[in-house]
Amino acid sequence: MDHPSRPQTQSTPMISFDETAHTLCIVGESFPENSFTFYAPVLDWLKQYLKNSQALVLDLAITYMNSSSTKCMLDLLDLMEDANARGVKVSIIWRFDRENPRSIELAEEFSEEVTFPFEIVAIS
């Protein structure tokens, strides 16, 4: 299955996968017209990837997320949590903008949803 790759638009984040580093990057704002349609291929790919992989880093720099994108992100975290329970080494790096207090609040809220490593890093 091909890894996800999407360019960033005004309403959707850039999505890319670095196979060597086992890192899925999601960068930008996320308020597509239909979040479930936008994220479905990413979730499908991730489900398959985590079945056959020993590691994944999710590197996020999301400055804004609407409520349906938030639900999709929680679905993504659930897949990672399940993989973690099976012994897959998963982690998240959430990059936030110091000038956007909602950005760090969002990261902190998501970090409470998982038991695996979740690093919150300020964007310089």
Image: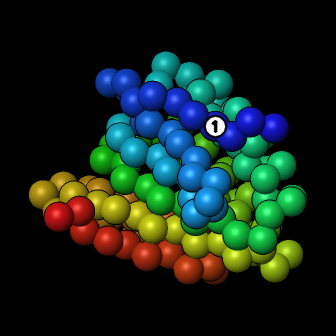
Residue that extends furthest to the front in the rendered view of this protein: 20
Q: Amino acid at mark 1?
A: Pro
Q: Who is closer to the viewer here, 92 or 74? A: 92
Residue found at x 36% / y 38%? 29
Write down the quadrant of residue 22 in the picture: bottom right
What secondary structure is found at the residue carrying circle 1? loop
The extreme top residue here reads 33
Q: Residue at x 70, y 63 (%)?
A: 80
What sort of colour scheme is used for the picture?
A: rainbow
Q: Nearer the viewer, residue 79 or 48?
A: 48
Q: Residue at x 40, y 45 (%)?
A: 27
In which quadrant of the rendered view does residue 109 lie? bottom left
Residue 114, x across and y down, in percent: 61, 73
Q: Residue at x 52, y 68 (%)?
A: 92
- Viewer-proximal residue, 106 or 42? 42
Apparent side of residue 109 relative to residue 16 in the rendered image (left or right): left
Counting other residues with Cα less than 10 Å from the Cα at mark 1, is it few (<14), some (14-19), or many (20 or more)? Answer: some
Q: Picture coordinates of residue 1 (x, y %)?
A: 81, 38
The residue beneath circle 1 is 4
| 121 vs 51: above or below | below
